[in-house]
Amino acid sequence: MKQHLKQLFSITAVLCLCACGTGAQPEDSAAETEPPAAVSESPAAETPAQTAEPEAAPNASRLLYLGQASMRITTPEAKVIYIDPYAPGDYSAPADLILVTHDHYDHNNVDMVSERNEDCQIITQNEALKDGTHQTFDLGYATVEAVEAGNNPNHSITECVGYVITLSDGCRIYVSGDTSKTEQMAKMSDMNIDFAFLCCDGIYNMDLLEAAECAALINAKVIVPYHTTAQNGVYFSYEQAEAFPVENKMILEPGDEIELHK
């Protein structure tokens, strides 16, 4: 099963993800078979047909999943965005932006991002939910829109946010933070989200069935289950992610990196 899902991480597979789920292997439309080379009359000189190798898209945005709710996005401009730093992994790329959804230890360890560019910005729930209003930040290389997040009794909706990040190439990524279903989710299908990361540990956050209900409301092209465990020192549960009951699901394990596309 893991091997099957790993095939989704090729460039051509990600290009097709917007139209498929894990139940069906996407067609590899980028790979074309060249016609056989000219052959001599001698059978020994016959040349087999060749298959063209797809080339990496120039300036493609990428996402590295680090575990729990932690990830790194690299934009087409090579700007680096870290979200909810906590899980161990590769934080070596100097940060241009650090996003924090709320003030819990498994989301706000910004000190892990020691490499930062001079103009690095940090946006936490305090800036994102200023005076009780969800804020939008136009950073040039990306637009970051804070959205509702929270549940009772673990996460106050007045102290937590999720983020919708729109990159300069138009790709939109939603990270839920810690939440259950919110009123705003009923309107989020209008945002045309490409990749939605939904928490689903079932202890401090919504369980798999509620997360699937949220996925239907948000209607993103690709759904990624994350924050799949509530155990200290455990950053991912493959079994929980695999059990997430949606068709357009992509499973990312810590250390997996994908290209982001519309």
Image (cartoon, helix red, strand yellow):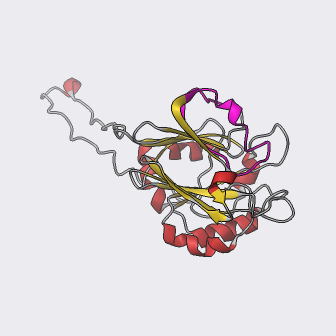
> Residue 256 versus residue 24: which sits nearer the camera?
256
Which residue does the image show at 75% across and 41% down from the upper left? 235
Which residue does the image show at 70% across and 62% down from the upper left? 149
Residues in magenta?
89-116
Specify the quadrant of the image occupied by residue 43.
top left
Among all residues in the image, which is located at the extreme front?
Answer: 131
Q: Is residue 199 magenta?
A: no
Q: Percent from the top left, x then y, of residue 57? A: 35, 41
**Do we see residue 175 in this rendering?**
no
**Do we see residue 49 in this rendering?**
yes
Specify the quadrant of the image occupied by residue 67.
top right
Which residue does the image show at 70% across and 70% down from the upper left? 182
- From the image, give the main secondary structure of the stretch colored magenta: loop
> Residue 257 versus residue 154: which sits nearer the camera?
154
Q: Is residue 46 above or below residue 125?
A: above
Tell me how many marks there are: 0
Which residue does the image show at 30% across and 38% down from the upper left? 52
Specify the quadrant of the image occupied by residue 109.
top right
| For residue 102, side relative to residue 133 (left or right) | right
Q: Percent from the top left, x then y, of residue 23? A: 57, 60
> Residue 46 versus residue 177: which sits nearer the camera?
177
Q: Is residue 104 magenta?
A: yes
